[in-house]
Structures are given as structure tokens and as C-alpha cells.
Amino acid sequence: MHRVERALISVSDKDGVVELASQLAALGVKLLSTGGTAKLLQQAGLAVTEVSDYTGFPEMLDGRVKTLHPKVHGGLLARRDSPEHMAAIEAHGIGRIDLLVVNLYPFQQTVARLDCTLEDAIENIDIGGPAMLRAAAKNHSGVAVVVDPKDYRRVLGEIREHGVVADATRFELARKVFAHTAQYDGAIANWLGGVRTDGTRDAFPQSLTMQFERVQPMRYGENPHQGAAFYRDVAPATGTLAHYRQLQGKELSYNNIADSDAAWECVKTFEEAACVIVKHANPCGVAIGRDCGDAYAKAFATDPTSAFGGIIAFNRPLDGIAAEQVSKQFVEVLIAPGFDDAARRVFAAKQNVRLLEIPIARSTNHVDLKRVGGGLLVQTPDEWNLAPEDLKIVTKRAPSPAQLSDLLFAWRVAKFVKSNAIVFCGDGRTLGVGAGQMSRIDSARIASIKAEHANLTLAGSVVASDAFFPFRDGLDVVVDAGAVAVIQPGGSVRDEEVIAAADERGVAMVFSGVRHFRH
């Protein structure tokens, strides 16, 4: 490997580039650059050769053509271990480019603007940058290529110490480049693929390219005979599970992550202090309260049996008092926006408990994905939260203000319960949850059985059904169990029959007008 003698620097993101170039120059590295980057480095007092002077060919077409030249690509692509390649570039007066530092036109930032036009987008498609990056990454055996400012310090350190960038580092950087250019091209394809011929945009592009980066391999998947790994979006939405910071505990498993996501997505929707306990992707206890401890006590009481070995999430930082309560049960994963010192001390004695710290935010994934055989189902996320004015009272009896509050609470929980979902609630807490049954009436029966086993009364409770009651029998089951108010979407051909049954039983019923199937 030759010493690094010449570097070409051309960046859109100028963060740290002056310091990088200054230190390279101090190490005797010759600097090539283009456009705004060259001017910035020259203003810093550095000796920089413009690429147009180096190639003997001026920038043209408003800068669209500047680095697409044999003196650039020959210097990047020539194999250092090939005498023929070395002789060829020497014969044509082409020098080696040993280090390439490039990042690309800000296409994604441009199209994220609400006022972005097709012309704006097109002008921010980089051509020369990806070509140079791919050339250098392909020839990483002889060229170090840097696309991420976070790698500047590491590369400088190796050049300072050894005069070269290590083989392993060059390979890692090349791998990073190909991932970066793939993401860049994918973003362009996604955005242009969503532009209709009339200039409007389709939410679902003609082709869909997505990129994820591996966070960790896993010992196994849902079951021990399945392999698995956890990947996250290259740019995950703020406050999503991918932002977790593990403070202690064993490595997260596949099921830990799946269940943790279900708990976190549910708990972060509440404004009040809330606790959600999840088992096998379903909430088995949800409550709001004065504080974390109060919310936890109510949520746990819903179904103590299922809560054993579950995932517990809070939407407030956990204090020592609440931590003492939680520590009395077996918990796999505990999630919160923060843990105070007292809480950390409580769980320090339980090192197997996984503590995850996630910043609280209301954002969700841009789309939801579900793999099917040979394909992919894509949908927008279910972000519909009801307000009181959205409800339609369809029975002679109207819910009281307290019942209305509980109906909205029950409806919010039902959105996170697998269909068919029936959720009994009262006083800002779940009382019985029936999930994932093929028949809605069976979910209703299971929910009432769960409440009975937890020694909770359903007398005076409210109930949410994630989809309409197709017959009156499901309504009769929940009313027989003690429910006095019901929320459901409506929309069945038998709505009038079910409304009449509610009036006959003397209960209040409201329609939400929207369902929450969760498969």
C-alpha cells in the first residue's frame, strides 16, 4: 500500500472538512478540490488545486461536469498492484488519488421541503459524487474513501501514525460507501416513483427501496430453530424503539424487541403518566395514574398472571419508588424515557433485567410493512386518535362524562390489541382484555374471564370493540359481564339490530366511525 500522497475532497456537508484538510496538508498530503469546497479551503489558507486545473478541463454545464474525467477516475481506479495499470496512468500523466472524501448533494433534505419542485429535486441529484465514490470503493485495496464526517478522525489517526489507512479500515469504509450510494439512489427512485404525470404525488411509489442497518445479530428468532438479526432504519423516526439505549441487562432477543415495540408504541400515545404491560405482543394491562407507581399498580392488577415475564413501559422517567414496586415481579424488559439514580440502584441487583431508555416522542414509522410470500404489504401507520367530538351517540342513553373518558381510553388501548379485540376499562385502567380470537364473541368471553381471574369486577365498566359487532350476541356478552357503555366503529348491516339491543339492555353506545384491526 502506497503512502497517502494525494486527496480529493468535495463535500456538500462542510462539517469538519477544514480541520481534516488542514491536518492532511500538515502531513504533506496534496489537496484537490472542487467548487465551494475548494473556496472554503482556500479561505482557510490551504494550498488547494482545483480539479479543473488538475484535469486541464474547465467545469461546465453549471457544474454538472467537473470530476467526470480520466485524470480523476484513472487516479481512483488504477490498481496499485498492477504494473500495467501503473504504467498506463503514468503514460497519460495521471497521478494516484489515495484518499477520496466526498458526500453528496442533499437530495433527501431537498425533497423533504414542502415547497420542493420537480426541478429542485432533479438539480439535487448528484452524478459525479456517486461515480467517484463507487470507483474509490471498488478499488479500496488502494484507495481510502470517506463519505461520513464521523470517520475523519479515525482516518487521520491512521495516516498520521502509519502514513496509510489500514486494509481493514479501507474495506469497512468501502462497504459503508456502497450502502450510502444505494440509499441515495433508493431515495431518488422512491421520490421520483411517486411523482404522477400531472405533478401530484402518490404516497406509494411505483418501486419501493428501503435501507436498514444491522444493530445486532441474535441468538435466534421467534423460536430457537430460526436465525434472526435486528435492523433499524438508516434514519429512524425520533422516539421510536430504534433509538433505545440499553442501560443494563442481557442481550435483547427477537421477541423482546417485538414486544418492547408494542409496549412503547402504546404507552407513548398517552398524555397522562401511563404504564403498559405487554405479553406476546398484546397489552395485558394498561393504566394512567398520578405517577408511574400509581399507573403501574393499576396496570399490573389487570392480569398479574400474564404480566409475569412481560415487558413494561412507562411514558415518564422511572423513580426509585416505582422501581421498588416493579422489582417485586419478574420482568424481561423495562422501558422508560429515563431512570433516576434510585431506580438504577434498585435494578443494579437484578442485572438480567434489561433497562431501555428511549426519548419520548409522538412520531411513528412513515409506513408499516408486513412480509408475505414473495412480496410486501405496505400501509400508512394507524395514528388515528379520537376526540370526544368525533363520537356519535347512537343509543337513547348517553355516556356520562366519566364514562366518555373511559371509552376514549379503552378505544386507545384497543388499537394495540390483536384483532378481534375486546377491552373492558374503568377509571383510566384496563379491567379485562380479550385478544386475537377468530370470533369477536370469544374475545368478549375471554376478557370477562380474565377480569374474573384477577378478582376485578366489571360492574359499571365500559368496553371497546376494535371493529363492529356483527350480531347482538357479542354485545349481550359484554353487558352480561357488567359493561354499561360501549364504543365500537359501527358500519355493520346489523347496526340497527345492535343499537336496539343496547337500548333494550339500557346501556350507552357510541360509534367511532373508524376501526382498528391489528393482525
Image: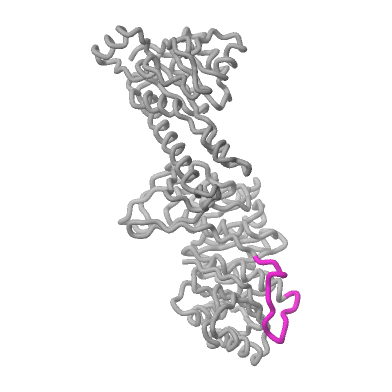
Left or right relative to 45: residue 254: left
Q: Can you name the residue that lies furthest to the right here?
A: 401
Q: Residue at x 67, y 58 (%)?
A: 292
Is 266 or 470 nearer to us in this picture?
470
Q: Looking at the rendering, in which quadrant would you find the N terminus?
A: top left
Q: Is residue 392 magenta?
A: yes
Is 124 or 209 nearer to us in this picture?
124
Q: How many tags in the picture?
A: 0
Rendered view: 241 above or below 494: above
Residue 167 in sight here: yes
Q: Can you name the residue that lies furthest to the front here?
A: 198
Residue 411 quadrant? bottom right
Residue 287 in the image: state x and y as whole percent. Answer: 64, 66
Is 309 or 208 nearer to us in this picture?
208
Residue 425 in the image: state x and y as whole percent. Answer: 63, 74
Residue 349 in sight here: no
Q: Which colour style is shown?
A: one colour
Residue 293 in the image: state x and y as whole percent. Answer: 66, 60
Q: Residue at x 51, y 51 (%)?
A: 354
Rendered view: 241 above or below 153: below
Magenta span: 386-402
Residue 420 in the image: state x and y as whole percent. Answer: 49, 74
Residue 277 quadrant? bottom right
Q: Residue at x 54, y 52 (%)?
A: 365
Q: Can you name the residue that lies furthest to the bottom here?
A: 504
Q: Residue at x 53, y 45 (%)?
A: 236
Is 454 or 217 nearer to us in this picture?
217
